[in-house]
Amino acid sequence: MAKISEFEIGYCTHIGCMAVKGAGFRVCKFPARAWLLEVGDRRWLWDTGYSSWFDRYTRAGIFRVYRHLTPVYFDEKLSLVNQLDAHGLAGNDIDGIILSHFHADHIAGLRDFPDVACVCSGEGWRHVRPLRGLAALREAFIPGLIPSDFETSLRFIESFDTLTLPAALAPFERGYLLPDSDGQIILVDLPGHAVGHIGAFVLTDEGWTLLAGDAAWAPANYQELRGPSRLANLVLADSAVYGRTLEKMNQLWRAGAVTIRLCHEGDL
């Protein structure tokens, strides 16, 4: 079965009600998490969290707004590449990086893994690829975080084999089989938060886990169907679709057969 290891790579702060309606205006801490997925001798990263590259590309120009709207706290010692090194793993030990979407807090560490191929939604990449300046900022996308050779070995999930999901994963019905994962990592569409936003069902010794990325920011979003405040609509690709994804996650959670992990679950 697959093994999942979790890492926290910096965090940002913003008011609680941005994540959960009615949570108030207390400033809360929202960690940026990444995961190492292992199947046999194969290893993938799920997102990268923050890195010093984020600081570099938000020091000047329009992207300074990003760091002021969501202040970021990051220690280089805790970068994903350094945490992996502490586990005895180097970049060439990683077979691929799976990107849930292209918001900066999920891709900031890409330049720390220059020779590692990436996997993402083709729809998501085609959407952000041409964005620059204000248009990119509105999508929380910082073009400078993308390595120059990013597309050289890029793979889109739409090219992977599709399959009908096990009944235990209902109401989710279809997924994309990650190559070389022995059927233990299945990528799924989790639309609404960002164009091309995806999640992953991972089969471990304890059963299925859904890495849900930013499909929710707190358990209350899907457990109580209490979405974020209307202010959050400014950063959601489609709030109506986001709500429908939460409803599917609510059904999955109520069935009780799947563990759900979120990228930014914080101290609300």
Image (tube, rainbow, N blue to C red):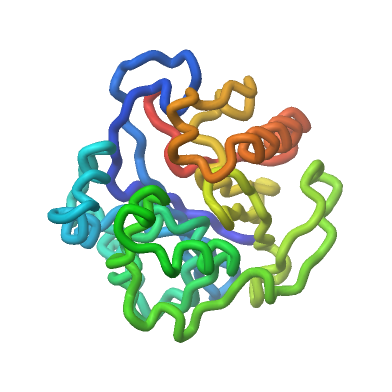
Q: Residue 49: in sight, yes or no? A: no
Image quarter of the C terminus = top left
Q: Could you say which is closer to the camera, residue 243 or residue 108? A: 243
Vertical order, 23 against 37 (above or below): above
Q: Could you say which is closer to the camera, residue 201 or residue 133? A: 133
**Where residue 87 appears, x then y in whole percent?**
34, 63
Which quadrant holds residue 246? top right
Task: Tell me which residue sits at (57%, 27%) in the image.
Answer: 221
Q: Is residue 200 left or right of residue 27?
A: right
Image quarter of the N terminus = bottom right
Q: Could you say which is closer to the camera, residue 179 or residue 20? A: 20
**Where residue 229 appears, x then y in whole percent?**
48, 23
Q: Is residue 51 left or right of residue 122?
A: left
Name the outermost residue toward the front: 134
Task: Tell me which residue sits at (35%, 35%) in the image.
Answer: 30
Task: Tell me which residue sits at (81%, 43%) in the image.
Answer: 170
Q: Could you say which is closer to the camera, residue 106 or residue 40? A: 106
Vertical order, 238 against 204 (above or below): above
Q: Residue 171: in sight, yes or no? A: yes
**Where residue 126 appears, x then y in whole percent?**
53, 68
Q: Is residue 67 left or right of residue 93?
A: left
Name the outermost residue toward the left: 60
**Where residue 145 appears, x then y in whole percent?**
30, 65
Task: Tell me which residue sits at (73%, 67%) in the image.
Answer: 183
